[in-house]
Image (cartoon, helix red, strand yellow):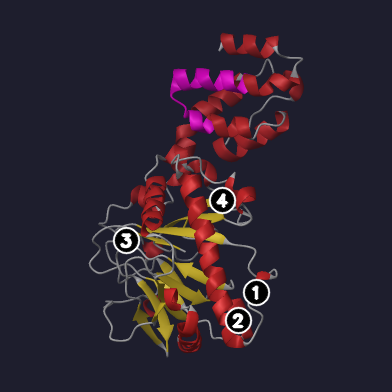
Amino acid sequence: MNTLKGVVQSTEKDSENRALIMITMGKALVHQSGISITTWAWLIWNWRDHSRLHKCLQEHYGCVSWPSSQRFHSGMSKPLESICCHEKIIKKIMEKFVSSWSDGKKLPEKYVFPPGKRPGKVVITTPKNIPVIDIGKAVGLDRSVIIQQLMQASQEFGFFQVINHGVVSALLDDTRGVFEEFFALPADEKVDLCSSDKSKNCLFLTSNVAYDKEEFHNWRDTLRIKGSPLEEHKQEWPLKPVRFRDIVGDYTNELRNLALRILELICEGLGLEKNYFDKGLSEEEFLVVHQYPTCPDPSLTLGTRSHTDPGLIGIVLQGDIPGLQVMNDGEWIGVEVIPGAFVVNVGFVLEVISFPSNTMRCIRPVPPLHSNLIIC
């Protein structure tokens, strides 16, 4: 600690070296007490001034005591002691996440839905399913046929699946893999993304943003990132896994292109200009990834409760295990898992314009074999 004081005092009049002070302190604390260097990197990156650091320490480490700016150089001990207790703070934040405590044996009371909202003993297989459309055929003479299929599916179901969409399987595998790696990271590598502020461009949360106000919790952990404009928001995405930003960036671009292709076909079917929805309606995009850990009793809880998507259009990449359901004619029907296919949901905005936007939910499979990952 004396070494740290010496470094602070030697640069007392040089405000531009504040970050160097933080780096030196961070390295020493990592060595002395095992504090995650990732945590310190986050503080350094966010470092602006004395009060900004104080706010960071309050929000992320529960540090209330902090010396005034005049006492900053001589009063380092208390905040440093608070930081040294950071493992307890991280544990407190992360203990809400299903994946951090679920052992697949017991379903906590807060996750048991009322009888009328439970999925019950669900049978996934059903003779009725949403249409599957080969969008790769939307060229030449077959284009009008595919447009008609899209229009009919949108009107009757509000959902459809697309195959031969042009997004290569290698990218789908890489995207799924990098998200699985993210969810498997140690708690201290993810805790800085936790927040109840839904305006943030990158959020790691459990159940919903309003977790503390919920009567019942969804059985899921979630990563939500804003994807457009890509270069603007990409810098706020997770740094780990190291491939995250490149792979997810490519995936986001491909999904945007696919969404615009589908919307163009729908516009043709509605008799609108083909780029009608490009003019401001499709600018704000989010990529949401739900992890559904193994559940001890899927008949009592939901991974995602019934809802209608508020956006223009939603594109979902299902996990390997069936679990997604959509409402049609008052009946919940299971969505078949087709490797490499995307489930497309006509959103609320499009519903106002022309089509019905049906309700969907995600249940846990029966029996619960292992965790599931859905990207939407």
Name the side, left or right, on which 116 lies relative to 18.
left
The magenta region covers: 21-39
Single out the mark in the foreground, 3 or 1. 1
**Crowd around label 1: few <14 · some 14–19 · many ≥20 (10 Å):** some
Between the C-alphas of marks 1 and 4, the distance is 29 Å
- Tag shown at residue 267: 2
Q: Which residue type does callout 2 highlight?
A: Cys
Q: Which residue type does callout 1 highlight?
A: Asn
Q: Which residue type does callout 3 highlight?
A: Leu
**Which is the main secondary structure of the residues drawn in magenta?**
helix
Between the C-alphas of marks 1 and 2, the distance is 8 Å
Name the side, left or right, on which 263 lies relative to 72.
left
Q: Secondary structure at mark 2?
A: helix
Q: Which residue is mark 4?
A: 202
> Where 328 sits versus 39, above or below?
below
Q: In this orientation, which residue lies closer to the viewer: 110 or 91? A: 91
Between the C-alphas of marks 4 and 2, the distance is 32 Å
